[in-house]
Amino acid sequence: MDLTYWEAIILGIIQGLTEFLPVSSSGHLELAGYLFGFDEPDNLAFTAALHGGTVLSTIVVFRHELRKLIKGFFEFRMNPETIFILNILISLVPIVFVGFMFEDRIESLFTGNILLVGCALLVTACLLTFANYAKPRTRPVTPQSAFIIGIAQAVAVIPGISRSGATISAGLMQGLKREEVSKFSFLMVLIPIIGMNLLAIFKMPAGDSFFAGPVIAGFLTAFVVGTAACRWMIRLVNRGKLIWFAIYCAAVGSASIIMSFVNP
């Protein structure tokens, strides 16, 4: 698919916003294809560039935390940084099993099916509502809670189930500290997204290029918008303001279901 600059920028905005806000990036890309008349691109360079932009956003926003984690890990002792990284690795077990083995099959069921995407958005709305009213506690992330958050991330391969919404909700409903949940949720996705991008690069056909104008435009847009969205989302989680996203997901999900019957 040949993308125009405007399509690349629109997709970059959608990716940058919805990767961090708990409203499902994959679900919104499906809805964008339905509303604007273009499909999610099969250009692997562009797909990798979009995700690369949001990965870079995460690295920029959490650069101080990442530096501290790396420094602590290479002290080669069981300090808080090493424990945090081990919990991140534990959280990856479900997504490695489900995401890499079944993601394509799951996404194929939802491709172009805004009815299923709408239903999944309603599930996201329910998760965010439960999390919004969860009693604030100060429990730290443990191996058990990290694995449960990892299961939530694996479920979020379904378009319409927000990855950040599912993982943050899973953490808050376990009574984990809000600040810890937001940091853990955003950092745990770095390894799987980087891994999927590397796979996309290895599979890239000869015709795809990272130096095409729309690819660069999509990358820059996703990075700039993603950086702002990530910082905004951290503040919202820490203040317990998830209910507005629950309302939004419920509204968009309901509209998607209605549209699927009006324009089957």
Image (tube, rainbow, N blue to C red):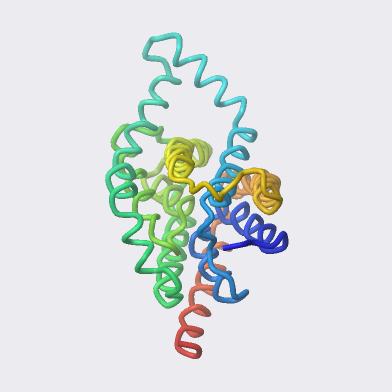
Q: In this image, 49 relative to 260: left or right?
A: right
Q: Is residue 101 above or below residue 137?
A: below
Of residues 39 and 67, which is closer to you in this image? 39
The residue drawn where x is 44% and y is 49% is: 135
Above or below, comparing residue 32 to residue 70 in the picture = below
- Above or below, 92 against 243 in this view is above
Furthest residue toward front:
206
**Residue drawn 47% across the image and 54% down it:** 165
Residue 52: give x, y in percent of width and height: 57, 42
Foreground pick, 13 / 125:
13
In the drawing, does residue 60 fall left or right of residue 163? right
The residue located at (37%, 14%) in the rendering is 78
Residue sitting nearer the eye, 203 or 81: 203
- Residue 213 drawn at (x, y percent): 71, 50
Q: Nearer the viewer, residue 60 or 243?
A: 60
**Residue 32 image position (x, y, % from top left):** 58, 69
